[in-house]
Image: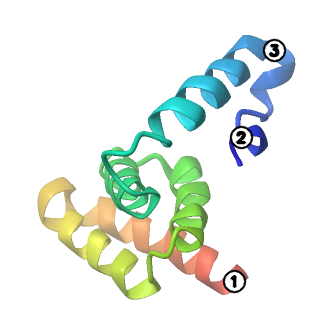
Amino acid sequence: MASQHGVGPYNEIMPRFGEITRDILFDEVWERPGLSKRDRSLITIAALAALYRTNQLEMNTRRALEHGVTKDEIGEVFMHMAFYAGWPTAVNAFEVAKKVFDEG
């Protein structure tokens, strides 16, 4: 699974960035036994929503669904984030989630 990650548009400019993403983030961090991939996905989408990182939020919302997070749970995460990260941030996150769900 980790070999699928770390390939992106930046790979042509900085291949080492892809290697680090694949080898450290996806092979080491995401595979640590302390949290399930499902839990890591919930944490990741909450952080990306709070930081207004729309492109990464879209990809990670897809991954969250693959890791067993339900659409309702994703909605709850974004509702919760509205009170901690701001209403506009949550609106943006809901728009991203709707796009992902509609592609579904």
Q: Residue furthest front?
A: 33
Q: Which residue is mark 2?
A: 5
* Other-residue count near label 1 (Cα within 10 Å), few / some / many at <14 / 14–19 / ≥20: few
Q: Secondary structure at mark 1?
A: loop
Comes first in the chain, label 2 or label 3 = 2
Q: Residue at x 46, y 57 (%)?
A: 37
Q: Amino acid at mark 2?
A: His
Determine contact: label 2, label 1, CB under 8 Å: no
Q: How is the image coloured?
A: rainbow
Q: Is residue 58 above or below residue 23?
A: below
Q: Which residue is mark 1?
A: 104
Q: Is residue 61 above or below residue 13?
A: below
Residue 59's image quarter?
bottom right
Comes first in the chain, label 1 or label 3 = 3
Q: Is residue 85 above or below residue 95?
A: above
Of 43 and 78, the residue lying toward us: 43
How far apart marks 1 and 3 lie (CA) works out to 31 Å
Q: Amino acid at mark 3?
A: Ile
Determine contact: label 2, label 3, CB under 8 Å: no
* Other-residue count near label 3 (Cα within 10 Å), few / some / many at <14 / 14–19 / ≥20: few
Q: Which residue is mark 3?
A: 13
Closer to the eye: label 2 or 3: 2
* Other-residue count near label 2 (Cα within 10 Å), few / some / many at <14 / 14–19 / ≥20: some
Q: Is residue 1 above or below residue 91?
A: above
